[in-house]
Amino acid sequence: MESNVTSKLSTYLDNLLRPTIEDILKDTFVDQDFDFIQRLQQCSSKIKPTTLLVRIKIQNFFSLFQHQSVVDRIGYLLAKHRQNQPINHISIVTIERLIELYLKYTLFIFEDYIYTFNHGMPNETRFSTLLSNLCLYYWKTKKFNNNEFILQYNDELFFTWNQSKDNLDRFLDTLKEFFYGDYIDLKIEYGQQINIQNIHLENRHGQLYSTMNTSSLLLPYVTGYPKVKYQKWFRSTLIHLIQLCSDYQDFTRQRIQTEIHCLISGYSNEFIESELEKFNRYFNVDIYQVQVNELAYQQLRSHLLKFPPRKSSNSIIQFTYLYDYGPYHEFKNTFSHIWSTYTNSHATLSSKQIKILLNAKHLFSLNNLLVQNKI
C-alpha cells in the first residue's frame, strides 16, 4: 500500500490521530502477549470457580464496517474525548472529511484490474488497524458493562462472565444485532479454558492458569545476520515463557522444547548453554534452580511482569550497513560512542531517549539474493 494514492494521507492521519486514539484505547486494548498477561493480573478479583472465560474472534475485522459507519463512530468518539476541541488545529469535522477521502480513494490491484473499497478498508496499513480498533471500542462501550473484565487483543475480544450460560448465550445473540447494516462474522469460544492468540488460559477453581501454545515456539525465519538474531530470539523467548507460564513445570517443558527446536535447526548445545549463562548473569539467577523451585520461579516471574510496557517505535532508529568481514562488536561500540557524543550536545535529541538498532547487511549472502526484506 506504500505506492497507493492515499498512502501519504494515511501516514498523516495516523500521526495526527494515534496519540489521541491510543489514549482512548489504553484501558481496553493490547497488541502483545506481555501486555495481555499484565492486564490479566488485574482481573483476579473477578474470577470465581464458576466464572466463564469468553473469546470472540472477529473474522471480518477489516471488512466489518461500512464507510459512513466508520466516519460516524470515529467522529463521535473523537468529539466526545476531545470535547469537540481540534487536534493539532484540525477540527473534528475536517478529520471526518479526510477519513472519508482515505476510505473512498484507497485502491488495490487484483488480476490486473484496479478496484476501490466500497466496504471495509485495507489490512496492510497501521492507520486502518487504528480505525478498526476505535470502531470496536465504540461497540464495547455500548454493549459491555463494568461488572466484567474485557480486553481487546488485536482482532479478538476476551472477557469474563459471572452469570449463567443461558444469559451468556442471549447476550451473544444481541451482539450482532448492534451492528445494524454492518455484517459481523464472529467465532465464539467460551468455557473454563480457551486459547487466545499465543496464550492458553484456564480457570482452575477460581485461579487463572496460563501457558504458551506450543505451536508458537517455532524458530522464525530471519535474514541478515541469523546467529545474532537467534541469540536475541532465544533470550526474549525465555523471558516470554516465564511471563506467560503461571506454572514452573510448564515453563520447564516449554524451555526444553525451545532448545530442541534450536538443536534441530543446527545450533549446538554450546550455543544454548552460552545463552542460558547470559540470561543467568543478567537476572542474577540460576535457570536450572528456578525451573525446579516454585518459589524462586514465581519471584522471577513477578519481577519480569513488572517490566514497563513497550515504548513507542518513534524512540527507535534503525540503521543498516554493509558488512563483509571484521570485528562486528568493535564497529558497533565505535558507532554508539560517536552517536552519543553527537546527541548529547544536540538541542533536541539530548532530551529524548532514543535507542539505536544496527542491522548488518552481508554482501555475499545467498539469503539476501533470494529474500526481499519488508521495510
Image (cartoon, rainbow, N blue to C red):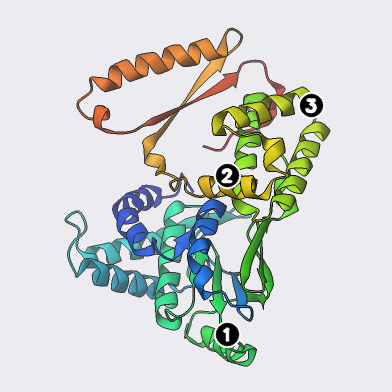
Mark closer to the chain start, 1 or 3: 1
Residue at the spot of label 1: 172
Q: Which secondary structure, mark 2?
A: helix
* Amino acid at the residue labelled 3: Asn
Residue at 47% across, 69% down = 118
Residue 128, position in %: x, y?
Answer: 45, 59
User: Is disc 1 surrounded by few (<14), some (14 to 19) or many (20+) residues within 10 Å?
Assistant: some
**Mark 1 and 3 residues: CB-CB less than 8 Å, in contact?**
no
Residue at the spot of label 3: 269
Disc number for residue 354: none
Q: Which secondary structure, mark 1?
A: helix
Residue 187 horizontal side relative to residue 262, left or right: left
Is residue 368 visible in the rendered image? The answer is: no
* Amino acid at the residue labelled 2: Leu
Q: Which secondary structure, mark 3?
A: helix
* Amino acid at the residue labelled 1: Leu
In the image, residue 202 sits, relative to residue 244, either above or below, namely below
Q: Nearer the viewer, residue 57 or 366?
A: 57
In the image, residue 371 sits, relative to residue 256, either above or below, namely above
Residue at the spot of label 2: 300
User: Is disc 3 surrounded by few (<14), some (14 to 19) or many (20+) residues within 10 Å?
Assistant: few
